Image: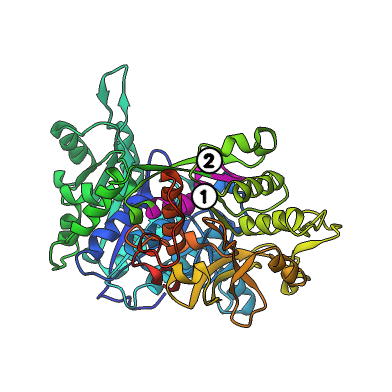
Amino acid sequence: MPDTPSADTKYIFVTGGVVSSLGKGIAAASIGRLLVERGLAVTIQKFDPYINVDPGTMSPFQHGEVYVTDDGAETDLDLGHYERFINESLSQANNVTTGRIYQNIITKERRGDFLGATVQVIPHVTDEIKSYIQMLAPGHDVVITEVGGTVGDIESLPFLEAIRQFRQDVGWKNTVLVHLTLVPYIAAAGELKTKPTQHSVRELMEIGLQPDILICRTEWPLPEEVRRKVARFCNVDIRDVIESRDMDTIYEVPLRFREQRLDDRIIDHLALRTPNPDLSSWETMVERIKHPGRGEVRVAVVGKYTSLVDSYKSIQEALIHGGIANDVGVRIDWLSSEAMDSQGSDALTPYDGVLIPGGFGQRGVEGMVDTVRYLREAEVPFLGICLGLQCAIIELSRNVCGLAGADSAEFEPETPHPVISLLDSQMKVTMKGGTMRLGAYPAHLVEGSRVREIYGVDEISERHRHRYEVNNEYRDALAGGGLGFCGLSPEGGLVEIIELPDHPFFVATQFHPELKSRPTRAHPLFAAFIGAAVNHRQGRPPIQPGDADARTDMATAGRE
């Protein structure tokens, strides 16, 4: 860590107590949004205490979605919330795990960087953690750092100790500690209980950290006497006890925090001078979500990990954004692709549009392929992402192009027609972590294609996470079957987007467009997909290329 941390940058730390999954990520992102609206340059980072170097090899059922940044980092899903709320593209430095910290330290030790010193948690581990906080300071007025897990977790202790030291290093007036805790309602007693919050704060204070602000997650409004009790026992000002209840939409949280003047309290603690935030456009966006003017469409997501919705968190949010762009509510049903084998196409008849997301492994793939066939033949709007594109290629190869037994080499190595095959660069890869095609890559959109009109530009940049690609040996056969290869890598060697020009909406991408969608600027493909679902519901003709409903004014989302 530099000897003299920047005095110009302010630092906010967000910790959690009692139980995990209380919403620290949304709280941190909401604080970030409020400060952005006050004219401050803000970035947010996540410290994850697990020993994995990154979440890239972790099961979606355990960890949820792996969020990918432009620079190819596989990160925690909270970084998606951060980007969506503060509208800033983040990087590998914004997600740090215990595994990465120790990997860096051991590399330095092997190189002899420590000059023969005994390597210890203090100062070497804590200094490495502090260096990641300080790394984000240049160009930012405020750095927000969320610590995963809860106070009391043994894995979190080095991070909390590093924060204690860092607050001393930069001066306490340049930092704010926000602690998110639970105030449960006990029905048998008929009252809200503050003891969990008191014990959580006491554990923090034993480490040497005094919270400045408490955000209390609760199912019920916090009466004045409960706020006063929390303030008294936790040694904070009553104005710094903030209520946080469940909202109809996560995008409402900044508005409720603003009502309680949370951002004012943070600004006061940090001795900053900024104008009040203008949340009028954010309020309009939230109102569109809660009270859409054009009714509701039903969309099914047919995937491999649908029993845990967090596995597709960015897709869920991008569909909501597409609804905002079309002033329509989006009801999402999560259907297991494995169950499609037994349920058949009848399960899909209620839907105005169907999305098939990414995934790895053979399980459930045939259900996805059958889903694609139904959507193609019934002319139901379809958006495929990553594995969704590959299933579309398999279905068209088998049922339109007459390539019996066509499959992906990932699922059936002995297939007579490997229409999806391993990238040449992946042939000799044996290490699974961080070795896929990751991060932002450019793509050229074919003139005259529907996708070109939807984006409104001829070149885009989108984020990838995959090992397998469309096999170029089968492109002519697929084109002969009516498939349009409407998005290609700049040199033309890799298929990025496909479409069926005569279908109301049949588009699939090798990349993950959901990662660049924002509530204030829906991704063009999601806006167009939901627009097509609206037309399907109403029985109108499909959206035509260039239709304002499909494209809105958001063509730059794919080039962010």
> Quarter-wise, where is residue 227 in the image?
top left
The kind of residue on which mark 2 rests is Trp
Q: Is residue 489 magenta?
A: no
The kind of residue on which mark 1 rests is Tyr
Quadrant of the rendering where the N terminus is positioned: bottom left
Q: Between disc 1 and disc 2, whose residue precedes?
A: 1
Secondary structure category for the residue under label 2: strand
Q: Residue furthest bottom?
A: 491
**Image location (x, y in percent) of residue 104:** 56, 70
Secondary structure category for the residue under label 1: helix
Could you say which is closer to the camera, residue 362 or residue 234?
362
The residue tagged 2 is 334
- Residue span colored magenta: 301-322
Q: Residue at x 41, y 48 (%)?
A: 534
Q: Residue at x 47, y 54 (%)?
A: 314
Q: Which residue is drawn at 49% across and 56% down?
A: 76
**Image location (x, y in percent) of residue 295:** 33, 42
Q: Does the magenta stretch include residue 314?
A: yes
For residue 172, side relative to residue 530 (left or right):
left
The residue tagged 1 is 312
